[in-house]
Amino acid sequence: MESTDNENFNAGNSARLSTEIIQNLIDNYRSNQLTFINEKLGIDDAHSIWFDLVTLKKFIAEIEEAAQNLDSPISEEDLGVRFYYAAYPEIPQEPIPENFSKKHTLVMVPTKKEQNQNYDFNPFESEENALAITGRMAMAQNHGDLVPPGSTNVESY
């Protein structure tokens, strides 16, 4: 059976991509989306974000723990993380630094698989309240280090 390009690209069992693919993907973003954003908004937008492993592992552990503490526990195989592209407001509020103004960021939220679809999942809410987003707390992660405003000398790509 012949595999598709999408299956090869998303192999899942290996955390490896060729440096050429990585560079090509990053170059595509920078020469298209980032250039458009910078020109249209007149800013030097972030093009990368860094999170330390402790923060990422803690977030994953919190998702797993919360999923196990539900009335109907969710298996590890049915959990995931969705990365939403986001942007800081023009006038950030503490603890967000002022130099993050209007820059790209990521917001990570847990997901759970149901009927072969990965749905956003907030283990702090019951299913009947899940659609009422306003005024509720949700499990999420943000506040990585952006480049820029951070130094680009730490990046390889």
Image (cartoon, rainbow, N blue to C red):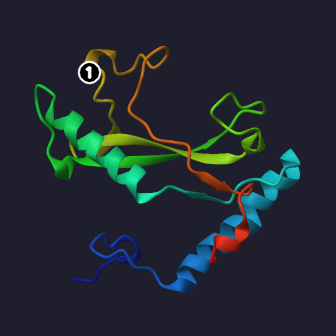
Most foreground residue, 30 or 152: 152
Q: Which residue is drawn at 28% across and 15% down?
A: 128
Question: Does 130 appear above or below 112?
Answer: above
Question: Which residue is situated farthest in the left direction here?
Answer: 72
Residue 64 seen anywhere in this rendered image of the structure: yes
Q: In which quarter of the image is residue 100?
A: top right
Where the N terminus falls, by quadrant?
A: bottom left
Name the element at disc 1. Answer: helix
Residue 125 percent across, percent down from the top left: 30, 21
Q: Which residue is drawn at 27% across and 73% down?
A: 13
Residue 91 percent across, percent down from the top left: 77, 30
Q: In which quarter of the image is residue 133?
A: top left
Residue 113 seen anywhere in this rendered image of the structure: no
Left or right: 138, with 89 as reference point: left
Q: Quadrant of residue 108?
A: top left
Residue 136 percent across, percent down from the top left: 43, 17
Where the C terminus falls, by quadrant?
A: bottom right
Left or right: 27, with 81 as reference point: right
Q: Which residue is drawn at 18% across and 49% down?
A: 76
Label 1 is placed on what type of residue?
A: Glu
Count neighbours of disc 1 (C-alpha within 10 A) and say few if under 14, some if 14 to 19, many if 20 or more.
Answer: few
Left or right: 1, with 9 as reference point: left
The residue carrying mark 1 is 127
Q: Residue at x 87, y 54 (%)?
A: 39
Most foreground residue, 115 or 127: 127
Across the whole image, how many numbered discs are drawn on residues?
A: 1
Residue 135 percent across, percent down from the top left: 48, 14
